[in-house]
Amino acid sequence: MPRVIDGRELQPPEPLELALMALDTLPDDEELTMLLYCQPHPLFDILRRNGYRWTETVQDDGTHEIRIRKA
Amino acid sequence: MHPNLSFEQAPPISVPYRFFLTAPLFGVVAGILLAWLGESAVASRWVGGALALTHLLAVGFMLQAMTGAVMQFVPVAAGGNVWRPRLVANIIHPALVIGASALVAAFLSQQGWLFRLAGSILLAAIGFFVVVAGTALLRTPARGATMLSMRIAIVGLAVTALLGVTLAEGLAGEAAWPLLELANVHAAWGLGGWALLLLAGVSYYVVPMFQLTPAYPVGLARWLAPTLLVILLLWSAQIGGDSPAWEQGVLLAGLAVAAGFAGVTLWLQQRRRRRVTDPTLLFFRGAMLCMIGLLVSAVVMALFPDLAEHPRAPYWLGVLALPGGFVSAINGMLYKIVPFLNWLHLQRLMGLGMLPPNMKEMIAERAMVAQMRVHFAAVILLLGGAIMPELVRIAGGVFAVSCAMLGWNLIQAARFYRDFRDRMRAAAPNPAP
């Protein structure tokens, strides 16, 4: 079951806080999806340092969809 | 996978903080100087006191804060690598402090050697910064309106510095240059080409993110910077000596661009998705109203030339642009950036599985609101000084208090970071570096 964090209505660093909590319990074979209106370089930095990989797509309304899983 | 895997960590927190914590000190000095000089400082645009005050804010406050912001913003928001940020900050920060201080001393004492000293130091420091920041901005894979605006802003800073050092040489010696026209062009590139474009570029990114507004309209974000660049080039034609007849129209066009950006920002704030009203939002609102006030004032002065000829007309415009516009916006931005950087750097130390403290704990909201009230009281008093010059002494005092409160609030945030980091290190036998 995919986990989704919609951070579009949240003030930083709330989306990051939710992501950190979700990553802490994310099973290796599952994926975390984040929806944001910006490209979250601090999150990418955290993911890179902690062994996660991600894909990013930008939707027509400007939403960045970031799909994260363990590397 | 995302292509930005190669970007390195953001600079150490001490890099931006040394700039952020220094900026309010220049504001305090500006306020004290105005309180000391009184009415003589606003008698004309060209008196040494007025020029010293202008540069205390423009170079001392604004350039400090904006340099720190660029050093931080490029890696965090754009994924760009700033070359050896600690070394760069170790060079640029003291150079800006000494250069700004020498420039202010030069305006107050009218000593030629001080103008040359200030010009040399500032040109070297700004030149170095332009190369470092410009390289990072050109090499980042990030695209879009923020990057375009910031890249042109860096060019604007370079032009401002070159014109500034030319003016300093002119004031130091006997050069028969058109100093009035050079000063007009220097001010336009500094306020429009550098400060406004940097503010706009950063705003495209942080206003929707922190104030939860819709994104800036694509057309405005794409065309504002190139349009302003063309206007600045037209405005620069006056260096040739003769002021063309269409010069006033160019000035109004430039101010209309600034007011357009301000109006759109206010409109976006009205449409924000969550009705959170915090000091940053209110600081921005005040700043944007001042930018619109600049255009309205310029139009009124164009319609009533007697007003434009008034000796305190430039002072009125200067207050709207500097303490009212840019200082307000920077002040509000600092109240978001500093707690956010605390949070990011603490998170880096803690790793996954633990959360840093809430951002709201890092600077008390009550302290920010109190400082904001004092700041806007100072802006109103400063504006009042254009009509009743006897107000400027008290206005300067209130402005100094406001900047001291800002500095104190930022110091509290820096202390919060240091204390929390030290407690973590004390609790963990092998903490992260």
Image (cartoon, coloured by chain):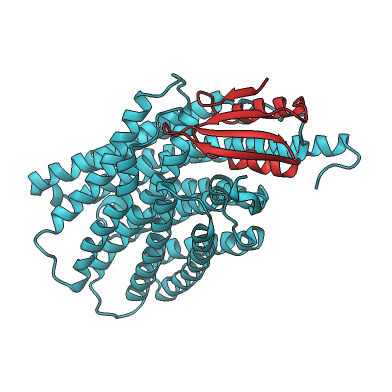
Chain colours: A red, B cyan
The image position of residue B320, as x and y in percent, is 30, 42
Q: Quadrant of the N terminus of chain B?
A: top right
Residue visible at 70% across and 29% down? A20
Residue B56 visible to an observer of this rendering: yes
Instruction: Out of B34 and B339, give the one closest to the viewer.
Output: B339
Give above or below for B156 relative to A33: below
Is B336 situated left or right of B385 in this image?
A: right
The image position of residue B31, as x and y in percent, is 43, 45
The image position of residue B189, as x and y in percent, is 32, 59
Give above or below for B97 relative to B31: below
Residue visible at 58% across and 61% down? B94
Give above or below for B201 relative to B263: below
The image position of residue B235, as x and y in percent, is 22, 61
Residue visible at 60% across and 28% down? A15
Residue visible at 30% across and 42% down? B219
How many numbered marks appear? 0
Instruction: Out of B380 and B427, give the one closest to the viewer.
Output: B427
Is B315 situated left or right of B298 in this image?
A: right
Is B339 situated left or right of B305 in this image?
A: right
Residue at the farthest right position? B429
Quadrant of the rendered image containing residue B345:
top right
Residue B359 visible to an observer of this rendering: no
Is B33 situated left or right of B315 in this image?
A: right
